Amino acid sequence: MFSGVSEVLCSRCGRDRGLAAPVEALAWVSERQGDRTTWLCPACARAHVRDIEGKLPEAYW
Ligand SMILES: [Zn+2]
């Protein structure tokens, strides 16, 4: 293993969780999709939630 580099990358922005500060790494969010696990960094996790809320029916009026 390379020190400081993990196999966990943010699925939105490609940030490497292994390069995040330990405290920040704890805030990463994992999502199960079938047999795969994808990860979102804290900033993208917040944006992702907003994406979901943006897809409420009102968005299609
Ligand atoms: Zn990200």
Image (tube, rainbow, N blue to C red):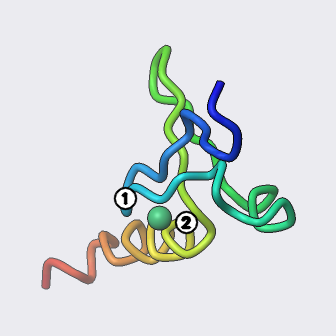
Is disc 1's CB within 8 Å of ligand 1?
yes
* 20 sits left or right of 26 in the view: left
Helix, strand or loop status at disc 2:
helix
Left or right position of 14 against 8: left
Residue at image coords 46%, 19%? 34
Mark 2 vs ligand 1: CB below 8 Å? yes
- Residue 38 drawn above or below residue 43: above
Q: Residue furthest right?
A: 23
Q: SS class of the residue under badge 1? A: loop
Image spot of residue 27 (x, y percent): 76, 62
Residue sitting at the far left: 61
Location of residue 53 in the rendering, given as x and y in whole percent from the top left corner: 43, 74
In the picture, the disc for residue 49 is: none
- Label located before the other in sequence (1 or 2): 1
Residues under numbered marks 1 and 2 in contact, where contact means CB atoms less than 8 Å apart: no
Which class describes the residues within 10 Å of circle 2: few (<14), some (14-19), or many (20+)?
some
Left or right: residue 10 compared with residue 28: left
Q: Residue at x 39, y 55 (%)?
A: 14
Left or right of 52, for residue 61: left
Of the pair 61 and 27, the residue shown nearer to us: 27
Residue depth check, mark 1 versus mark 2: number of the one nearer the observer: 1
Relative to 15, does residue 44 appear above or below in the rendering? below
Q: Residues within 10 Å of mark 1 (few under 14, many from 20)?
A: some
| Camera-nearest residue between 8 and 12 | 8
Q: Which residue is mark 1?
A: 12
Q: Is residue 46 above or below residue 25?
A: below
Q: Dividing the image into 4 quarters, which one contains the N terminus? A: top right
Tag 2 residue:
45
For marks 1 and 2, give the CA distance. 9 Å
Location of residue 7 (image quadrant): top right
Residue at point 55% right, 66% down? Answer: 45
